[in-house]
Structures are given as structure tokens and as C-alpha cells.
């Protein structure tokens, strides 16, 4: 699928399938693919920014949409702000946690920020190590939150102390995505595929 088939642009950043619709977070639009037809929600239609970076099913219904530096609830008609980060940052990852809360990473020029939201309320805003890029975020079956990019970190859901997997280093490049598979956590990196267990 590209602009030839009806996408607003070829710069798709995120994708989500929900209730018969494939949502595509794009540059300049939120595209919806239903029954072979693509429609685009643009700034003139209420899109609250330029770049749709992340999409997530809202546990309370609708979608949570990362647009530029903010998280918005989309009910199918309009966007309502949930939280926004610093003006120069951009959301790179949004996940739903086991307890129904939402974690997001906002990438800034010098420092990334971890945001924790529940019931459309910001619970926590935690600056991460300066110049450490976080590109992927996930929660495992034990409830640990994983942050990955050029380093591999996690923290327990009941303990906010960030722990680092010390034997992950530059020989693996940097991590772009995370997948859970039972006891294994898989990390897709630029120089290989990494599995972590125990």
C-alpha cells in the first residue's frame, strides 16, 4: 500500500488493526483502511499535529494516538488530549501495561522522557539518561517494563529503579523492536536478533 492505493503519504510510522479497520499512522494523516478503501484524517479534519508516530487500543475504548509530542484519545470522531511532553520532543513508542495504564517514550533533542498515564492523567514523567536513545518499549509477562535502543534496560512494575543488561553492547547495534514469547524476550537489533531469558 502506498500513495498509489490511497495513503496520504508513503511515510507510515505505525500500524494497528482494530474492529475491521487497519489504522496507519502517517506523516500528515491518520489513515484508515476498511473493506479495501483508504480514508485519511488530516489537520483540517481535526488531526492535532503533523506526525502520527504510534497507535494503541485504548483499554477504555477507542484509540490512543501518538501525534508529534502528545498522546490523544480518538473516539472515531474527535481527538482529546491525554498528555503532551516537551515541545521539541516526539513520541516514539506507546504501550498498554497489565494494570491498564499507558507508558510512552518521548524522544527529545538531548534527553528522552518516560511518561506514565492512567485514566487520561499523567502519573509520572521521568527523564532518562541524556543522549540515550529509546526506540522500543514493552511489558513482559512478569510486569517488567523494558526500554531498548542503544542500551537495554528494564524496571519492575513495583520498583522504579532502572536496571541495565550489562552484556548488551555495541556489537549488537541498537534495538528497534521487542517481541514476547513465553519466557523469552526477543529484541530485533540492527546487527542481530537477541533473546533474553531469566
Image: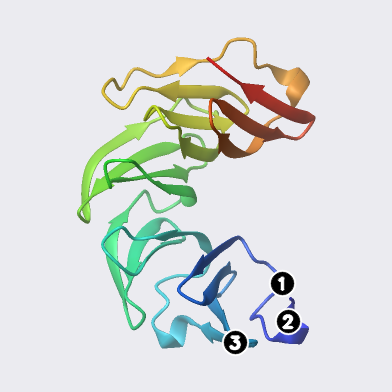
Give the residue displayed 68% in from the left and 16% down from the top. Answer: 169
Whole-number angstrom distance, CA of label 2 to CA of label 1 = 6 Å
The residue pinned by badge 3 equals 35
Label pair 3/1, CB-CB below 8 angstroms: no
Label pair 2/1, CB-CB below 8 angstroms: yes
Residue 159, located in which quarter of the rendered image?
top left
Q: Residue furthest top?
A: 166
8 relative position to 79: left or right: right
Judged by depth in the image, the label closer to the viewer, 3 or 2, is: 3
- Which of the pair 198/128 is nearer the observer? 198
The residue pinned by badge 1 equals 10
Residue 87, located in which quarter of the rendered image?
bottom left
Q: How is the image coloured?
A: rainbow
54 relative position to 196: left or right: left
- Which of the pair 147/179 is nearer the observer? 179
The residue pinned by badge 2 equals 3
How far from the left and from the top, in percent, is residue 42?
Answer: 50, 82
Q: Secondary structure at mark 1?
A: loop
Which quadrant does the N terminus fall into?
bottom right
Give the residue displayed 58% in from the left and 10% down from the top. Answer: 166
Judged by depth in the image, the label closer to the viewer, 3 or 1, is: 3
Q: Looking at the image, is 143 positioned above or below residue 165? A: below
Whole-number angstrom distance, CA of label 3 to CA of label 2 = 17 Å
How far from the left and from the top, in percent, is residue 158?
Answer: 26, 23
Q: Residue furthest front?
A: 182
Residue 35, located in which quarter of the rendered image?
bottom right
Between discs 2 and 1, the one toward the N terminus: 2
Amino acid at each position: 500500500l502506498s500513495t498509489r492505493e490511497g495513503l496520504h503519504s508513503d511515510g507510515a510510522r505505525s500500524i494497528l488493526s482494530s474492529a475491521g479497520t487497519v489504522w496507519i499512522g502517517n506523516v500528515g494523516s491518520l489513515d484508515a483502511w476498511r473493506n479495501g478503501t483508504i480514508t485519511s484524517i488530516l489537520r483540517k479534519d481535526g488531526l492535532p499535529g503533523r506526525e502520527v508516530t504510534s497507535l494503541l487500543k485504548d483499554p477504555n475504548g477507542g484509540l490512543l494516538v501518538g501525534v508529534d509530542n502528545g498522546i490523544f484519545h480518538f473516539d472515531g470522531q474527535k481527538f482529546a488530549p491525554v498528555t503532551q511532553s516537551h515541545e521539541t520532543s516526539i513520541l516514539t513508542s506507546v504501550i498498554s501495561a497489565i494494570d491498564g495504564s499507558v507508558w510512552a517514550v518521548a524522544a527529545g533533542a538531548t534527553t528522552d522522557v518516560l511518561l506514565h498515564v492512567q485514566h487520561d492523567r499523567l502519573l509520572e514523567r521521568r527523564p532518562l539518561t541524556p543522549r540515550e536513545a529509546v526506540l522500543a518499549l514493552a511489558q513482559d509477562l512478569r510486569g517488567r517494563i523494558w526500554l531498548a535502543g542503544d542500551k537495554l534496560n528494564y524496571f519492575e512494575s513495583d520498583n522504579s529503579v532502572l536496571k541495565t543488561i550489562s552484556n548488551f553492547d555495541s556489537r549488537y547495534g541498537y534495538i528497534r523492536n521487542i517481541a514476547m514469547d513465553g519466557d523469552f524476550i526477543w529484541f530485533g537489533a540492527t546487527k542481530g536478533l537477541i533473546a533474553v531469558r531469566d
